[in-house]
Amino acid sequence: NAGVTQTPKFRVLKTGQSMTLLCAQDMNHEYMYWYRQDPGMGLRLIHYSVGEGTTAKGEVPDGYNVSRLKKQNFLLGLESAAPSQTSVYFCASALGRTEAFFGQGTRLTVV
Amino acid sequence: AQSVSQHNHHVILSEAASLELGCNYSYGGTVNLFWYVQYPGQHLQLLLKYFSGDPLVKGIKGFEAEFIKSKFSFNLRKPSVQWSDTAEYFCAVILSNNNDMRFGAGTRLTVKP
């Protein structure tokens, strides 16, 4: 039972490049979240999903897109990376409006 | 707009000192409340949660929190901290009319041996 797995763990991008972060959970959770964590700002919600095929915007959605084609996977895409998107990204999943289980994080640097 | 405030950014304590970390939220309806902990280099883990019932909830590692509805607060407490409690602590809220979980900015706790 792996819980929540994020791929990759580290990545360096050049400005303007695109990439996709993958989050996979094996707990049959309905809810999935993507957060970014920046010093002094806590975790800010980017996008979330309450079930397969659904997505919704969070606090800071600009510059990101998401897809939830399969219940167990939640993908976060950056179409044209900017230095302001340098951050640590965390994925989480939950059964519902209850406690979330987090992945180990992806450290992304945009140069 | 929904917000979660953690007033203490960095708290430094000696071992065996008592801890109280503040958390306030700005919403008048029903909320689900959480405290998470993030140890250095690790992901967030749940400390405790409150949905309803007894407003004093107990979590793991001797932590507890008290929900005071009239003050929109959910403060975290521990009677005697240990060096191993050094970590960052986050308060989080889910509103009754929403599905997203919002976090406060976090409080970094340093416990000196």
Image: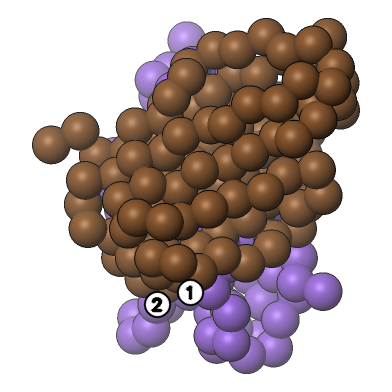
Label 1 sits on residue: B32
Residue B93: image location, x then y, percent: 57, 66
Have a look at marks 2 and 1 and say if they share a chain.
yes
Residues at badges 2 and 1 in contact (C-beta under 8 Å)? yes
Residue B16 in view of the camera: no
**Mark sitting on residue B47:** none
- Label located before the other in sequence (2 or 1): 1
Between A51 and B87, the one lying in front of the other is A51
Q: Residue at x 48, y 17 (%)?
A: A9
| Gap between marks 2 and 1 measured at Cα | 5 Å
Q: Which amino acid does label 1 sit on?
A: Asn
Question: Label 2, on which residue?
Answer: B51
Give the brown chain's letter: A
Closer to the camera in the image, A62 or B28? A62
* Image quarter (top left, top right, bottom left or bottom right) of the N terminus of chain A: top left
In the rendered view, would you say B56 is above or below B9? below
Q: What residue type is labelled 2?
A: Phe
x and y, in percent, of residue B30 in the image: 55, 87
- Residue B54 seen by the camera: yes
Q: Which of A23 and B103 is in front in this view?
A: A23
The chain coloured purple in the image: B
Looking at the rendered structure, the number of numbered marks drawn on it comes to 2
| Residue visible at 80% across and 26% down in the picture | A81
Q: In the figure, B62 relative to B96: above or below?
A: above
